[in-house]
Amino acid sequence: MHTELRRAPAPRSTDACPPTDGPAQGHVLAVGAPGPRREKLTRTLESTGYSVTHAVPGDIGRSVRQTPPDAIVALDGGQGGHGGVDQAVAVVEEIRTAPQGQVLPLVMVTADREPAGVARLLRSGADDCLPEAADPVELSARIAAKLHRVPVPVDRLALDPRTGLYSAPHFHDELDRELRRPGPGRRQGVLAVVGVAEADALEERFGARVRREVAERLAGVSERLGDGSGRLGWDEKGRLLVLMPGIDEETARRALQDFATAVAGTRFVVADENVRLTPAVGWLPLADADGRRADRAVGQAADAVAEALRHRDLRPVRYEPWMRAATAPRSRARKVVRPFLLALSPLLALLIGVGVPFALYEQTYALLGWDIASGIYWIVVAGLVLSASLILLECLFSLDAPTRPATPAQPYPPASAVIAAYLPNEAATIVDTVESFLRLDYPNDLEVVLAYNTPHGLPVEDTLREIARRDRRLVLLPVAGSTSKAQNINAAVTRVRGEFVGIFDADHHPAPDAFRHAWDWLSHGYDVVQGHCVIRNGDSSWVARQVAAEFEAIYAVSHPGRTRLYGFGIFGGSNGFWRTDMLARIRMHGSMLTEDIDSTLRALQEGARIATDRTLISRELAPTRLKPLWNQRSRWAQGWLQVSLRHLGQALRHPNFTPRQKTGLVVLLGWREIQPWLSLQILPILLHSAVRAGGADRIDWATPACLLAFAFTLSAGLVQTAFAGRLALPELRRRRGWFLRHALISTVFYTHFKNIVARQSHLKELLGDRRWRVTPRASATAVTPGTAKAVGGR
């Protein structure tokens, strides 16, 4: 219970009723038909200190123009009911139609006391409404209040009073002024438009008001990061409008990237609910604005926003003219030349890797007398020995790989699993995959988000919807317009509720304790942990068996050994667990064919700690034929090249990497791209030597150094396979024949196969062929700890 203190009303003889002598408080235009009512109103206004002029309905605009008043007080028609209200509404509309009348305070004095009539008058544009019997003091006070705080329509205000942002018309005015500057004056400047991927979903839940809130939250982040020189506005779609005058393009792009990352890494309160937002930033330099018109420039930036919304990867997208078309244009010559060159790529690789060096060796010897092939030979031998040494070092360090903490440092939080799927390719296996996730053992809430894209409806979707109705932990998330795994993951990251997220391909069956073991790492300060991917269809074909043994060499030996040797791990694309906050900031870039490695490098640059755990198991399917394996490894090799080109130079200059880590990055991103071409140099060197010696039979093949280098290089692969067989899971360790065949096939074929793939991928990247070829799923027999069988494919 509380006591409310009320101020006593002022006596009528005090200053609440101002005297009539002295200077007038203001000029009021009294509107109404001549007669007793208007005369009474005039006396009332004059008695409270106002000067009064008159106007009749139908002639208000002329009176306002001739003698602009400070305020308008208007009478209704003098009769109650709908007729009087209609006449009063007509008076209001006449006043507000006049340009000068739009911003003048308007008080209506009416004989109608019905709430409905008062509401109509206020909605039509009146600022206040009083009954005719109101006290003169009250009328005077209300007029004084309107003069002190002049009511102005929101669309006429430069800054929105609720958000503090420029309204769209006033932002366009500001932009117009910048665009009308002479060429040199507007050369430095950028316009950006920021949309939000979740805007439609939020509006559906909370109503249209949420768009204003979203714009306000975005502006808050921008103001927190910016230097105050930019101008911020918003439009009716809730998009943030950003004008950045006097700034160069690269600086603007970096600022917009920092802004997008900050937004994605922030939890906002929108409509009293915590949400994550995915900003989509489109921008263009002011110098490139179409026709120097603000509306066209904003439209161009909005087209770039639409492109950014497709990817949801937080990268600001610069407007390009093709964005107004359905697809990017391709020249006729490119359509013809590229497929032709790609078809000849095996010959081109031999020409570049063998023909050109051989011609160089021959011409240098013939014209200058220099036998540079001898020097190149020892470089090649040293390179092969270095590669073998690095493999052996990884094997040795894998024995001392960091072990998983015995207990979590914090209680198990809610967790999320994201399964990314291209559904037409996964229809045969996706139901089994979903069911395996719903059987996982985790002591807290575990939601399973199936983020998928499909060009058309499929019968399996009905089955999935039935499972989702039966088990509410399953969340189906069709991603409209998606064309990549990266887009599916990016769409899911703002929907997940878990404190950490496990990312999986659609053929993975994680071990029951996978999420528990992942949190054991993450709770001890790690940001990402990569698990051990095990092939479960090794009995399907010799290709699958080869991949099964290779995966043990990768996940049981190379990844743990490299993490121990160089001080960082890598996220391999599946069976990887991220802190949700980190994943929300990093996202996946769909333009990269290995978006997982790209995200690893960007996370490491932010200072992320990435662990590798060979005991954190998930079983997947391997390709069962050579052609799908070629396509898969070609995409991997080209993706690694993209990452090397984009990140190696940046990483070597980045202060967050230690010298030890930079050494590892040189090996991982630099040496791996050189090695396939360097190993090929043995062919032109031998050809040159045979030509000089007069035949291959005259070459001394028994050179001790050559034989030792050959033996050492050959032994590295055999040792790595032996380590893989020793550190593999027990169910695979028993398959000794698989590892023996892997060692033999790798020596005579598979290593050369992967080098050929790498060289071909380099040419594909050079020719701009970045198509994603889906690895088909095939039925296969699973290898599991027991005798259970599973059907699927990758």
Image (tube, rainbow, N blue to C red):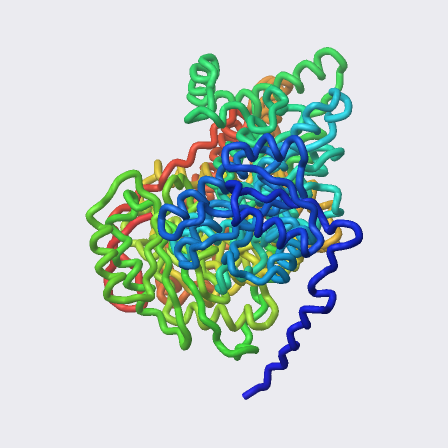
Residue 315 vs 149, above or below: the answer is above
Could you say which is closer to the camera, residue 284 or residue 705?
284
Q: Position of residue 735 (x, y in %)?
A: 35, 60
Residue 86 vs 300, above or below: the answer is below
Residue at (67, 35) in percent of width and height: 67
Which quadrant holds the N terminus? bottom right
Whether residue 641 is visible:
yes
Q: Would you say 620 lies left or right of 721 here?
A: left
The quarter holding residue 496 reads bottom left
Could you say which is closer to the camera, residue 173 or residue 253?
173
Q: Would you say 391 lies left or right of 757 here?
A: right
Q: Position of residue 22 (x, y in %)?
A: 80, 53
Could you say which is closer to the camera, residue 756 or residue 83?
83
Q: Would you say 221 lies left or right of 460 here?
A: right
The residue sitting at the front extreme is 36
Residue 680 vs 266, above or below: the answer is above
Residue at (21, 53) in percent of width and height: 462
Q: Position of residue 185 (x, y in %)?
A: 77, 25
Could you say which is closer to the camera, residue 120 or residue 110?
110
Q: Position of residue 599 (x, y in %)?
A: 56, 49
Q: Would you say 231 lies left or right of 626 here?
A: right
Count the marks: how many?
0
Residue 574 vs 330, above or below: the answer is below
Whether residue 710 is visible:
no
